[in-house]
Image (spheres, grey):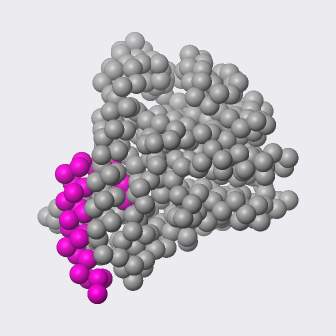
Amino acid sequence: MRLADRMFRIGTESAFEVLDKARALERAGRHVILLEIGEPDFPTPRHIVDAGARALDEGWTKYGPTGGLPELREAIARYVARTRTVAVGPDNVCVVPGGKPIMFFIMLALLEPGDEVIHPDPSFPIYESVIRFLGATPVSVPLLESRGFSFDLGTLRDRLSNRTKLVILNSPANPTGGVISRDDLGQIAETLRDRDVMVLSDEIYSRIWYDVEPSSIASVEGMLEKTIILDGFSKTYAMTGWRLGYGVMPQWLARAVNLLTVNSNSCTASFTQRAGLAAIEGPQDQVGEMVAEFRRRRDAIVSGLNQVPGFRCASPQGAFYVFPNVSGSGMSCESLADLLLGEAGVACLGGTAFGAHGQGYLRFSYANSLENIREAVERIHRLSKHWAG
Ligand SMILES: Cc1ncc(COP(=O)(O)O)c(C=O)c1O
């Protein structure tokens, strides 16, 4: 028996493979510092856990409405309307198990073989995986270190064609930590406004930013009807394992996403949604504390990596990743990542795990303690005699 052809086009996330390698080293007695995984190391805030546990006790253990519990959809609509200054209501909201299903369902609902999808390079590998899986064509637009890892807008314009159906934006971004400026968003909107294209705006890191609050393209005049906002609870509230995310989109598309939900997972776990309601409506101080801690770690890892011969590390404006340029080491990013894991016990990802334009970069997640980050940087520094001079 042979798998369907489409299964030979689907990709994966190599963060999970590196995690397996790191765990194998740990079993062999090595001490490994894990800086490759994309999840906050903080616990889910207590009041959210309590709300989830209470929901279980109260019997929120049955099927719920396909698109999400009405009270959660209303709370999300209010939150998104306030934070993005857009006019949206509960009928624009689809609640799903994590941010990823929005990516998958939106592309499943929109793409035909031969359609083109513009996506950033480097970017979250699942975008390209799903585009190829559906027989559509990924068209990458390089992110430029010199522009704070934003697009060159001229290149974006050049890559648009009459087959472009979807443009994917991600700000703050994985893997670079880059934030698309309000000015760039305005220009991107200008370019797309009169075209028959949709924009998938992945804003899963919307609350993790440092100096300038990121904007959403949905807020730009004329773009709301063309935009799907992807957001969720995984990163903001350290709820990766609860599986809770959402999309905010025009109603015609929300109906399609709900049909895909009926046909796949029926609905999202009800008690998880009750916890989500407590997250979005409850106190937000722990989000602020988490971001303040991320900022300390960002500053430590950026200044540490900038001392390593052959490394140059920009200070990212959002998310919890740094993406140092390591081309000065003279090694490919894949070999360097292997060397760091094997010789220094520091797990990170080569930039090419996120696209061809990631060559010459590494991605470190700083969702780890300040102590471990300092130790990791020291180990890398000690190892640098392998490539320096
Ligand atoms: C850019 C981006 N989008 C979406 C997701 C998926 O988030 P979730 O765990 O809520 O599915 C991630 C997770 O790493 C991500 O980095």
Specify whether 221 is left or right of 177. right
Residue 354 seen: yes
Image height check: is 55 above or below 234? Answer: above
Q: Residue at x 43, y 77 (%)?
A: 327
Q: Nearer the viewer, residue 24 or 163?
A: 163
The quadrant of the picture occupied by the N terminus is bottom right
Q: Position of residue 126 (x, y in %)?
A: 56, 56
Seen as rendered, the residue at the extreme bottom is 389
Q: Where is residue 40 in the image (x, y as percent from the top left)?
A: 35, 43
- Asked which quadrant contains residue 26, the reply is bottom left
Secondary structure character of the magenta stretch overall: helix
Q: Does the magenta stretch include residue 206?
A: no
Query: How many numbered discs?
Result: 0
Region in magenta: 362-389
Image height check: is 316 above or below 290? Answer: below
Specify whether 342 is left or right of 328. left
Q: Position of residue 259 (x, y in %)?
A: 70, 34
Q: Which of 1 and 299 is in front in this view?
A: 299
Q: Does the magenta stretch include residue 365?
A: yes
Seen as rendered, the residue at the extreme top is 58
The quadrant of the picture occupied by the C terminus is bottom left
Specify whether 386 is left or right of 136. left
- Asked which quadrant contains residue 388, the reply is bottom left
Seen as rendered, the residue at the extreme left is 29
Residue 19 seen: no
Q: Which of 153 and 57 is in front in this view?
A: 153
